[in-house]
Amino acid sequence: QNTNVNLDTTTELYQFDLHSDSSVLNLSASTAVPGDILNQFFIDEKNGTVRVFHHQQNNSGICLACGVEGDGGVTFVSSSDSKAQATLETGNYLSTFRQEGGKLGLQDREGPFESDEVPYSARFSGNLGCIITFLRIDPLTCFDVEDPANIKKLGELEIAGVSFHLEAVGENLMLGIGQGAQSGSIVANLFDISNPIQPTLADQLLLSPNGEYAYTPVFYDYRALGKEESSATFAVPFSSDSGTAIALFSVDQANKKLLSNGKISKPNQVDSYDSYQRGFLFSDTLAALSYQELEVFLRSNLSEIFSSSLTP
């Protein structure tokens, strides 16, 4: 829940107890996190520790710790809460919290880092937290959160473009779907985080037609990414200058490679517009959902075996 206090944004983070009584939803702890938390992948919990990436844009220069807005208006907070809620310098942060009575107490905070960069995507994988920020280049930054009271910034990788969505693949790989160095292109980036002090780009696969402007709903909605976790196979719907398509690819985890599994596509029509929005992977079929049709294809050769119009 986002609130504005003295022109600075805070996000109220609530923890609920789901174990004591399944018929009652009990609020167990809460805290105010400075700045914005972009989406659910910026929050994680492990062994009772809540890990949060957040971005602070300080617009006022006024001490946020002096007053916190709640249901009863603005109330002053105690010094023990000040560190967790205080106004921070503009930038990106990683904070860890643990329940202390009815509050989520701050354990540690790392930042600001990449202060002139905007956060786009994040994922936690085991004891690692990784985040993508972007201005002109795309830094992937990794943190060690094994000890919640001692966050350690490990290393970063800068590449052209930006990954709008991250997926953990196994323990040592991170998959990014985003825009490549060529403006308007859609790429899959495979990051090797086995040595998080020096993360590397293991492979990159161009998904959209070369030289065309393209866009995918995966950029703003993680549900648009079709995936089969058992085979690490993914489906990315997109639209480009020439039409709409769903690109299929898989991750070869042993060799750290991205393998193209083909593409289904249909050209733009003069009298109507259509765009693939979802690709659902089943054991031997791919169901493709666009604005106008539901189509089913065999995954073995991508031949169509069923279609149904969704328009009158």
Image (cartoon, rainbow, N blue to C red):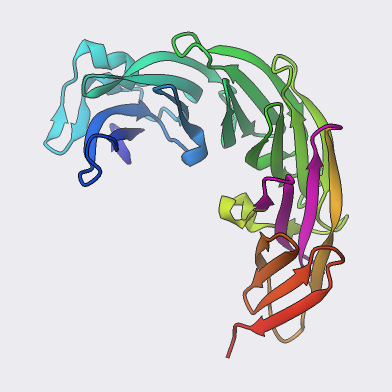
* Closer-to-camera residue (101/65): 101
Q: Position of residue 237 (x, y in %)?
A: 70, 60
In the drawing, does residue 18 fall left or right of residue 307? Answer: left
Q: Position of residue 158 (x, y in %)?
A: 74, 26
Q: Please, which residue is most extreme toward the left here? A: 72
Q: Magenta stretch: give its range.
A: 227-255
Quarter holding residue 295: bottom right
Q: Position of residue 231 (x, y in %)?
A: 74, 46
Residue 200's place in the image compared with 234, above or below, is above
In the drawing, does residue 263 fall left or right of residue 22? Answer: right
- How many numbered discs sit on the rendered protein? 0
Which quadrant holds the N terminus?
A: top left
Q: Residue at the location (44% across, 36% down)? A: 37
Q: Residue at the location (64% across, 13% down)? A: 154
Is residue 88 among the parts visible in the rendering? no
Is residue 297 among the parts visible in the rendering? yes
Which quadrant holds the C terminus?
A: bottom right
In the drawing, does residue 285 fall left or right of residue 142? Answer: right
Residue 253 in magenta?
Answer: yes
Residue 143's place in the image compared with 166, above or below, is above
Q: Position of residue 215 (x, y in %)?
A: 70, 57
* Closer-to-camera residue (230/57): 230
Q: Residue at the location (64% across, 39% down)? A: 166
Quarter holding residue 291: bottom right
Q: Please, which residue is most extreme toward the top here? A: 150
Residue 21 in magenta?
Answer: no
In the drawing, does residue 191 fall left or right of residue 5? Answer: right
Quarter holding residue 230: top right
Which is the main secondary structure of the residues drawn in magenta? strand
